[in-house]
Amino acid sequence: MNKNYKIPLIYQTMNERGSGSVENYVWLNEMEWLSIDAIREYEYDEGESELIIPFAFTGGGDKWVWVVNDENKEYSIGLCERGEVNGVYYAKNMEDGIFRQIIEYVSDSNFYLNKAMAKSYQVSESELMWQLEKWKTCLDGILNKKYLDIIGSLRELSLKYVRSQYGEWVALITLDERNKLLNKYIKFDLLDEEFEWYL
């Protein structure tokens, strides 16, 4: 990592709280955190742009990165998939990236109503409610009050069948409800646009 670049304040705060440790880990469905030491010592592959700073990985090994556009600005979040030369802007900043992860998680097929028909990765409604409460507690002082209030309000909902052109599954909110939240709170000019991360 270039010594002129800075670890975003939110990530520093999470690190100070031990959010990457076993005891206090802040779990997100598709973001497996790197320690600040691992971020600073990251070794770039030949051809990999140093204007990206990997800070987490997906379960499949894709990289979550901060995209450095201007050293004085907050870094955007990007997703760099293995085998692709272009990454995709995911969020304007770390706060929005975490919030988007949570909203996408509760709208996806990660849950079951009937345990006998559950897949190995799916959890029950009670486990989901526990996770939402943990996020609200652990992310207090990291996410803004509005995001925390929305996470809290999700606990007042119940799992339901969601139908779309992609099929049917059990979720807490529909894709339309998800999109309304994301469009209202995390929209920015570069969202879902591509950037070059492998030269």
Image (cartoon, rainbow, N blue to C red):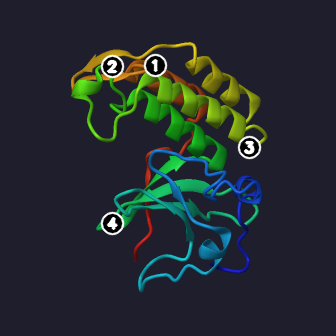
Q: Nearer the viewer, residue 3 or 195?
A: 3
What residue do we see at 56% from left, 79% from top? Answer: 42
What's under tag 3, amino acid-wise?
A: Ile
- Image coordinates of residue 148 in percent, x first then y, are 69, 29
Mark with earlier residue (4, 1): 4
Residue occupied by mark 2: 113
For residue 115, side relative to residue 133 (left or right): left
Q: Classify 34 as above or below 23.
A: below
Residue occupied by mark 4: 82
Tell me the mark number nearer the camera, choosing from 1 and 2: 2
Q: Residues within 10 Å of mark 2 (few under 14, many from 20)?
A: some
What's under tag 4, amino acid-wise?
A: Arg
Q: CA distance from mark 1 to mark 2?
A: 20 Å
Tell me the mark number nearer the camera, choosing from 3 and 1: 3
Q: Are marks 4 and 1 in contact (CB under 8 Å)?
A: no
Helix, strand, or loop for circle 4?
loop
